[in-house]
Each structure stands twice: as C-alpha cells, then as structure tokens.
Amino acid sequence: MIVSATALAETVYVRDTLYVPLRGGATAEHRILHKGIRSGTAMELLEADPESGYSRVRLPDGLEGWIQSQYLMDSPIAAVLLDETTARLQKMEAEYNANVDQLTALQQLQIVLSEDNRILKQANAALTAELQEIKTTAANVITIKNQNASLLDERQALEEQVDALLLTIDTLDSSNDQDWFIRGAGTVLLSLLVGFIIARRFYRRNISGGWS
C-alpha cells in the first residue's frame, strides 16, 4: 500500500483542449457539419440564441453553423495566451540576440575604426614631418639661391676687377714697351754720339799730325 501510494504520488494536469461539434441548427439533433472544433479556434459570431443556448458562427474557412454558447468566450484560452506569450518571448529573444549581434558587430567595428584612426594619426604625423622637411628644404633652397645670386654678383665684380687689372697690365706693358724703345733708341743715339765724338777726336788728331 505504501509503495503503491508513493508510486502514484506524481503531479498531473487537466487538459483544456476540447473539440466541439459544429451543427447545422441550434439543437443537438441537427446534423453535425464539423466533428470537432479545437478549443482556442477564433471564429466570427453571427448570431446568439439564449433560449436554445446555441450561437451561429463562421469559421476562418467560411463554414457557418451552430455551436453551444457555453464553449464560447470573449478572450483566448490559456493555451492560446501561452502560445502568444511564448511567441512574444521568442520574438523578444530573437530581437535581443539580434541586438547582441549588432552590438558585437559595432564593437568590432569600433576596434577596426580605432585601429584605422591610429594608422591615420601615424600617417598624419609622417606627412606633417615630411611637410616640415619640405618647408625646411625649400627655405634652404631659397637661401642657397640667394647665396648663389650673391656669389654671382661677387664673381661679376671680381671679373670686372680682373678686366680692369688686365687693362692696367696691358697699359703697363705698352708703357714698358715704350720705355724699352726709348731706352733702346737713347742707347743707340748715345752710342752714335760717343762714336761720333771718338771719330771726331781721331779726325782732329790726324789733322794736327798732318799739319806738323
């Protein structure tokens, strides 16, 4: 007895699923049009007859008939509510999972964007340094150009001085030539004069000896 009672001590539930016949009229003697309409089935109420306790309804497929009013209610049964609640929960869970996936994708995208931002910052720093180097090089080029221009001016001035010196040298060379010419001519004239004087003395001596 104790073992049997223990074996039978389990939880059980009463079914709320019913199958109600749909008849051709508002009595139990009318022909059955549908053997069993499952509880929770939504249908359209066309007419209610309180005296007979039947109501005329239209099924979703368009079939019309009479069903006992005691099986009709204004709200869905617990099973339908449970199904609807379960469907809503499943929908919410799917939306939650979709939001989680979207959040994960956004986090991954943020990581990628952060990496891209870091790379862009490095590229910007490199470009800034290169631009500064270009500016420095350009400034050096301008300085070198100015120095070259100054050197060209100095070279031109030196060339002018060299030309002036060459002209002076040419002038001095001409003057030296003239001096040498004059000196040579003077030497020749002096030699002629000395020779003339010596010849005249000899000539006088010869004359004096001849007279004696």
Image (cartoon, rainbow, N blue to C red):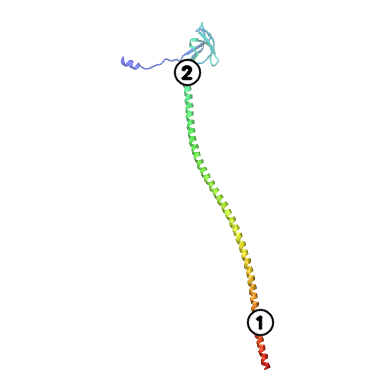
Q: Amino acid at mark 1?
A: Leu
In the rendered image, residue 13, in percent from the top left (x then y), is placed at 41, 16
Q: Residue at x 67, y 88 (%)?
A: 204
Residue 25 visible (yes or no): no
In the rendered image, residue 123, in percent from the top left (x then y), is placed at 51, 43
In this view, the residue in front, 8 or 211, is: 211
Q: Amino acid at mark 2?
A: Leu
Taking 17 as reference, is 62 left or right?
A: right
Which SS class for mark 2? helix
Q: Residue furthest bottom?
A: 212
Marks 1 and 2 close (CB-CB < 8 Å): no
In the rendered image, residue 19, in percent from the top left (x then y), is placed at 47, 14
In the rendered image, residue 130, in percent from the top left (x then y), is placed at 53, 46
Which SS class for mark 1? helix
Query: Within 10 Å of the Cα at label 1, are there few (<14), some (14-19), or many (20+) other Cα atoms?
Result: few
Q: Residue furthest left?
A: 2
In this view, the residue in front, 167 or 12, is: 167
Q: Which mark is residue 81?
A: 2
Q: Point out the image quarter for the C terminus.
A: bottom right
Q: Quadrant of residue 160?
A: bottom right
Q: Residue at x 62, y 64 (%)?
A: 164
Whether residue 177 is situated above or below residue 35 in the rendered picture = below
Q: Residue at x 65, y 87 (%)?
A: 201
Residue 110 visible (yes or no): yes
- Residue corresponding to mark 1: 193
Q: Residue at x 49, y 37 (%)?
A: 114
Q: Quadrant of residue 197?
A: bottom right
Whether residue 29 is situated above or below residue 127 in the rendered picture = above
Q: Point out the image quarter for the N terminus.
A: top left
Whether residue 207 is situated above or below residue 34 in the rendered picture = below
